[in-house]
Image: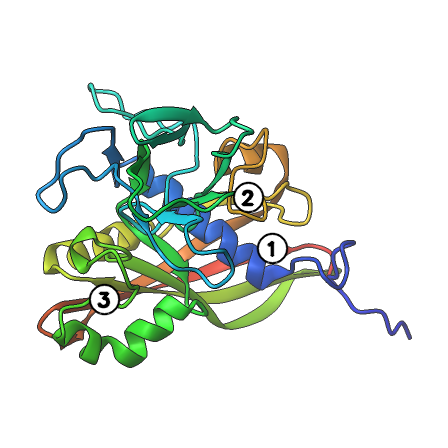
Amino acid sequence: MSLDFKGIDPAGFGGYALTDQLLYNLKWFIDWGLLNNGAYGIYEYDSSSWYDDDEARLHLVPDERYEYGRVWNGAGREFVWESGVSLGGGAVNPFRVSGVYIDGNFYPISNTGINRHHVDYMNGRIIFDEPKNAETDIRAEYSRRSVHVGFADDPDFRTLMMKSLEEFLSDTSPSGNPAREHQIWLPSIFIEDSTGKGRGMQLGGGQIKTRYITFHIFADTPQDRNLLKDWLDYQSRSTFWMADLNNITFPFDQYGDIVSGITNWVDMVSAYPWKRLRVVDGTSMTLNSLNSQLFRARVIWEVEIDFGKI
């Protein structure tokens, strides 16, 4: 009798199996769908804002991993990294960061001098190789996501679940500076893959894996909560291919900057398809708010993936 584990990818230990394949592809699927329906903001040099004289202006923030003065945040949780989004109708399409303005002078991302910098798309910030003075006027033109999509294992999710009452009643942002009006990560969707089961696929072998995916929705307006709940609920009965995480080049380097040659999730799927995901059923519900300033909902998908060789 063979004692070999079944279903193990050739990448082995240290590679990606079903759970992470699902989580990352679902995040990228939702990110892509939201972008293609206008869920992003454009911030250009000298663009005005109700909250700030210029939302292209970056804010110095502390990060214990870097020398003080190296990390400068934009207005938002994430910058848009995908290319190829085209809404048409005269809309300004999202774009990648091309460089920074320092005291009015532009330095492209290719700059190699004392103003060399990296774009951390995942955290919506610029990281300089050399620290900058706190009084320096630093700006960048960028696109930011209107909705943050993360995982239930993320610290942000635990902060919302455990500390939101105190944080929101004091009217401060759980994610720190800049202040709450910039919507650092609200509205947000957090993805959780918690339960599953399997059944036989066909005579001679194979399994159909069923997973129950929960989307935890948090917003600071009931309109955003309702919209995201409905949009996710509409995707029931959808089918799409997933990219193979064991073969793709991940989009980001150690700084969170874009790796050369990466375009978007759709192109990753086309180049390295893994398995087809089927959303066979879905349920949605509105949850009681933790307080008067936080609105919650939950959408659950029942998804199936065929494994023909286990």
Q: Position of residue 11 (x, y in %)?
A: 76, 54
Q: Give the label, 1 or 3, closer to the camera.
A: 3
Q: Which residue is rendered at x = 33% and y = 34% of the image? A: 140
Q: Give the label, 3 or 2, closer to the camera.
A: 2
Does residue 238 show up? Answer: no
Residue marked by disc 1: 306
Looking at the image, residue 7 lies above or below residue 37:
below
Q: Give the label, 2 or 1, closer to the camera.
A: 2
Separation of marks 2 and 1 at Cα, in angstroms: 29 Å
Residue 297 - label: 3
Q: Position of residue 210 (x, y in %)?
A: 52, 65
Residue 252 - label: 2
Q: Earlier in the sequence, mark 1 or mark 3?
A: 3
Q: Which residue is rendered at x = 43% and y = 52% of the image? A: 27
Separation of marks 1 and 3 at Cα, in angstroms: 29 Å
Looking at the image, residue 125 lies above or below residue 259:
below
Q: Could you say which is closer to the camera, residue 52 or residue 157? A: 52
| Amino acid type, mark 3 | Ala
Q: Quadrant of residue 83?
A: top left
Mark 2: secondary structure: loop
Q: Earlier in the sequence, mark 3 or mark 2?
A: 2
Q: Position of residue 158 (x, y in %)?
A: 37, 74
* Figure colour scheme: rainbow
Mark 1: secondary structure: strand
Q: Residues within 10 Å of mark 1 (few under 14, many from 20)?
A: some
Q: Position of residue 94 (x, y in %)?
A: 33, 30
CB under 8 Å between discs 1 and 3: no
Q: Could you say which is closer to the camera, residue 196 or residue 19? A: 19
Q: Which residue is rendered at x = 28% and y = 26% of the image? A: 87
Mark 3: secondary structure: strand
Q: Residues within 10 Å of mark 3 (few under 14, many from 20)?
A: many
